[in-house]
C-alpha cells in the first residue's frame, strides 16, 4: 500500500511539474520581444471578411478576412531568433457570400476597397492587339482582351502569348454559333482557369448560357465610345471595369490614361486579380 501511495505521489509530482513548466513557458513567450512585436502587427493588419454585394441580378466581389497566425509565426521566428515580417504566416477566411462560382449574376465591378480598375479591349478581326500589349509591357500593367472567332482563327499564338503573360481572355461570341469553340480554345487548349463573357446590356438568355458553361458575365461600368481619356477621367472610380475598342485614338491616348490612373494610385489589373477576393498584405 505504501508503494502505491509513493507511485501516486510521483505521478502527481510529474503532472504538476509538467503543468507548471508549460505555464512558465507560456508566460515567458508572452513577454518575448518577438511575440510582442507579432501581436502589435497583428492588431494592425487584421481584416474582417466582407460578403460579395448582390443587388437583384448584379454582383460585386467581397473580400476574404485576414489575420496573422500568431503562434505559428512565433514558432517560425524563434528558429531564427529575431522578428522578421517576411516570416509572418497569414490565415484567410472566406466570406459567407462570395463571387466564387456565382455565375448567375452580372459582374459590374471589382471591390472598391482594393483601389483597382480593369480594362477590357474588344478585339475584332484585324485589331492591333500586339500594339496594345506593347503599351501594357511598357507600363507594367495587365489587360483583358475579349475576342471574336475571326481574330482567333488567325492569331492562335498571340492568344497563348497573352495568357502566358498574365493577360485575361474573354469571349465576345456569346450569342453566336462559335461561342462553344472560342470558349473551348480559351479554357481547354490555352488552359485559362476562368472564363468570361461580355455584354453591354442585360440579356437573360446570354446570362443563362454563360452561367451553364461556368463563365462569369461581365457588364462594364464604363463603356468608352469616344474621347477615351476624357471619358475615363470623368467616370472612373475604384473597382471600375472599362471597355474600349482598339482604334488609333485608343492607341494614342492609352499611355496618358495609364499615367493618369497610376498618378491617382489605381492599380490596373486583369479580371483574375480584379475579381479575386483574396488579400495580399504580405
Image: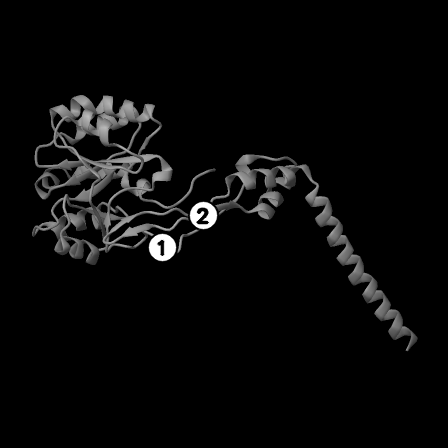
> How many numbered badges does the structure rendering display?
2
Q: Position of residue 266 (x, y in %)?
A: 33, 30
The local secondary structure at tag 2 comes to: strand
Compared to residue 180, the image places residue 73 above or below, namely above
Q: Residue at x 11, y 42 (%)?
A: 148
User: Residue 168 or 220: which is nearer the viewer?
Assistant: 220
In the image, 74: left or right of 139? right
Image quarter in which the N terminus is found:
bottom right
Compared to residue 116, the image places residue 64 above or below, namely below
Q: Would you name the residue on which mark 1 appears?
A: 97
Q: Residues within 10 Å of mark 2 (few under 14, many from 20)?
A: some
In the image, 111: left or right of 232? right
Q: Would you say the residues marked 1 and 2 are in contact, meaning their CB atoms lie under 8 Å apart?
A: no
The circle drawn on residue 196 is none
- Of labels 1 and 2, earlier in sequence is 2
Q: Position of residue 251 (x, y in %)?
A: 16, 24
Q: Residue furthest right?
A: 2
Q: Position of residue 21 (x, y in %)?
A: 77, 53
Q: Position of residue 239 (x, y in %)?
A: 30, 38
In the image, 171: left or right of 98? left
Q: Residue at x 55, y 35 (%)?
A: 85
Q: Residues within 10 Å of mark 1 (few under 14, many from 20)?
A: some
Q: Residue at x 9, y 50 (%)?
A: 178
Q: Residue at x 29, y 30 (%)?
A: 141
Cα distance between the residues tagged 1 and 2: 12 Å
Q: Would you name the residue on which mark 2 appears?
A: 65
Place residue 116 in its image quadrant.
top left
In the image, 232: left or right of 14? left
User: Residue 98 or 234: which is nearer the viewer?
Assistant: 234
The local secondary structure at tag 1 comes to: loop
Amino acid at each position: 500500500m505504501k508503494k502505491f501511495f509513493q507511485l501516486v505521489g510521483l505521478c502527481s509530482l510529474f503532472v504538476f511539474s509538467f503543468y507548471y513548466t508549460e505555464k512558465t513557458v507560456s508566460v515567458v513567450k508572452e513577454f518575448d520581444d518577438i511575440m510582442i512585436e507579432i501581436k502589435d502587427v497583428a492588431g494592425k493588419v487584421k481584416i474582417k471578411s466582407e460578403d460579395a454585394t448582390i443587388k437583384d441580378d448584379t454582383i460585386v466581389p467581397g473580400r476574404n478576412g485576414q489575420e496573422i497566425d500568431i503562434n505559428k509565426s512565433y514558432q517560425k521566428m524563434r528558429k531564427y531568433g529575431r522578428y522578421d515580417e517576411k516570416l509572418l504566416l497569414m490565415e484567410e477566411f472566406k466570406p459567407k457570400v462570395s463571387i466564387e462560382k456565382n455565375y448567375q449574376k452580372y459582374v459590374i465591378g471589382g471591390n472598391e476597397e482594393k483601389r483597382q480598375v480593369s480594362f477590357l479591349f474588344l478585339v475584332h478581326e484585324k485589331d492591333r492587339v500586339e500594339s496594345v500589349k506593347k503599351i501594357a509591357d511598357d507600363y507594367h500593367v495587365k489587360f483583358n482582351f475579349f475576342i471574336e472567332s475571326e481574330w482567333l482563327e488567325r492569331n492562335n499564338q498571340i492568344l497563348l502569348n497573352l495568357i502566358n503573360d498574365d493577360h485575361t481572355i474573354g469571349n465576345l461570341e456569346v450569342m453566336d454559333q462559335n461561342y462553344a469553340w472560342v470558349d473551348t480554345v480559351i479554357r481547354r487548349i490555352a488552359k485559362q482557369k476562368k472564363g468570361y463573357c461580355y455584354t453591354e446590356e442585360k440579356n437573360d438568355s446570354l446570362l443563362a448560357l454563360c452561367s451553364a458553361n461556368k463563365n462569369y458575365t461581365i457588364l462594364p461600368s464604363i463603356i468608352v465610345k469616344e474621347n477615351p481619356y476624357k471619358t475615363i477621367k470623368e467616370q472612373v472610380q475604384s473597382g471600375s471595369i472599362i471597355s474600349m475598342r482598339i482604334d488609333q485614338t485608343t492607341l494614342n491616348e492609352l499611355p496618358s490614361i495609364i499615367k493618369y490612373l497610376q498618378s491617382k494610385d489605381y492599380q490596373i489589373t486583369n479580371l483574375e486579380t480584379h475579381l479575386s477576393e483574396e488579400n495580399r498584405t504580405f
